[in-house]
Image (tube, rainbow, N blue to C red):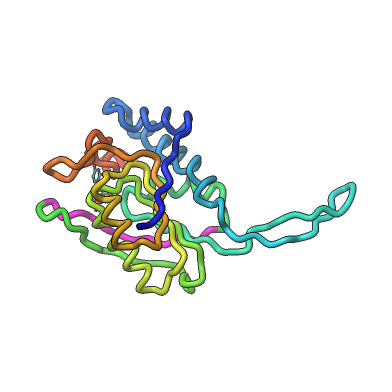
Amino acid sequence: MSKVTIFNHPLIHHKLTIIRDEKTNTKDFRQSVSEIANLMAFEVTRDLPVKEVYTKTPIAVAKTYTLDCEVVIVPILRAGLGMVDGIQSLIPTAKIGHIGMYRDEETFEPVNYFFKVPKHIEDKEVIILDPMLATGGSAVDAIELLKSKGVKKMKFLCIIAAPEGLERVQKEHPDVQIYCAHIDDHLNENKYIVPGLGDAGDRIFGTK
Ligand code: PRP
Ligand code: URA
């Protein structure tokens, strides 16, 4: 089973409350999703490789460190787009790939409609973004698509996960580390996360 990191931080709890609230408007929802991703980025990037460099300060030469890798952020459309800014503001050199997926309303199976990732992604540190991990179908397929491109180092970052989906991704991709702000209770008959926050894509883009 892959490792799961859960966040227990007052700022994340506070912002989770905002995005769960059915009265929160599109602007505040989008902003809070981005801020949660930004707060999570610190932990997700904790083990990125660094190299030693020597830097001349106005006083002396200091031994310092710079990132020794390239990062690719891969949001799963649409809702994952809401997390991009929060990560990219901390890693401005990151390249961005896109995976377009929606869940079929009857089967709840993911349907892939777009896949475009940077060249040589196989050598990069990949961070997949999607605020919701429900049945886990979208996450499993997205990871498979990236593995088919040769990606070896990848992490999956979500905001709310259902236990069912989490277990499925852990079993099918034990090599992928998962980060989620909170694990909710269960999935309802429509495979929505309970208590969750509703449809993340619709709430980010104001489409319902
Ligand atoms: C949502 C969400 C995930 C998926 C999770 O996308 O953003 O991609 O559902 O469900 P799963 O774990 O059961 O696969 P949705 O299909 O609503 O598309 P959207 O982001 O374009 O609204
Ligand atoms: N997708 C969402 O946006 N919300 C859920 O609860 C489940 C899937």
Q: Quadrant of the C terminus?
A: top left
Which residue, as the protein is rendered here, is positioned at the far front? 1
Task: Check if residue 101 falls in the magenta segment.
Answer: yes
Q: How many marks?
A: 0
Q: Is residue 194 above or below residue 106?
A: above
Quarter holding residue 187: top left
Residue visible at 42% across and 27% down?
14
Residue visible at 47% across and 65% down?
153
Instruction: Please tell me which residue lies in front, 203 or 55.
Output: 55
Q: Position of residue 22 (x, y in %)?
A: 26, 28
**In which quadrant of this rendering is ligand 2 seen?**
top left
Quarter holding residue 204: top left
Instruction: Please tell me which residue lies in front, 143 or 202.
Output: 143
Q: Is residue 115 above or below residue 183?
A: below
Which residue, as the protein is rendered here, is positioned at the far top? 23
User: Does 108 sit left or right of 76 as displayed?
Assistant: left
Which residue, as the protein is rendered here, is positioned at the far right? 59
Quarter holding residue 8: top left
User: Does 71 sit left or right of 174 as displayed?
Assistant: right
Q: Position of residue 126 (x, y in %)?
A: 46, 61
Task: Check if residue 50 falls in the magenta segment.
Answer: no
User: Does 127 sit left or right of 68 as displayed?
Assistant: left
Residue visible at 29% across and 59% down?
171
User: Does 105 sit left or right of 149 as displayed?
Assistant: left
Q: Position of residue 150 (x, y in %)?
A: 41, 74
Which residue, as the protein is rendered here, is positioned at the far left? 106
Instruction: Give the main secondary structure, helix, strand or loop, of the magenta stretch.
Output: strand
Residue visible at 21% across and 58% down?
110
Q: Quadrant of the N terminus?
A: bottom left
Q: Which residues are magenta?
A: 94-105
Q: Position of residue 124 (x, y in %)?
A: 51, 67
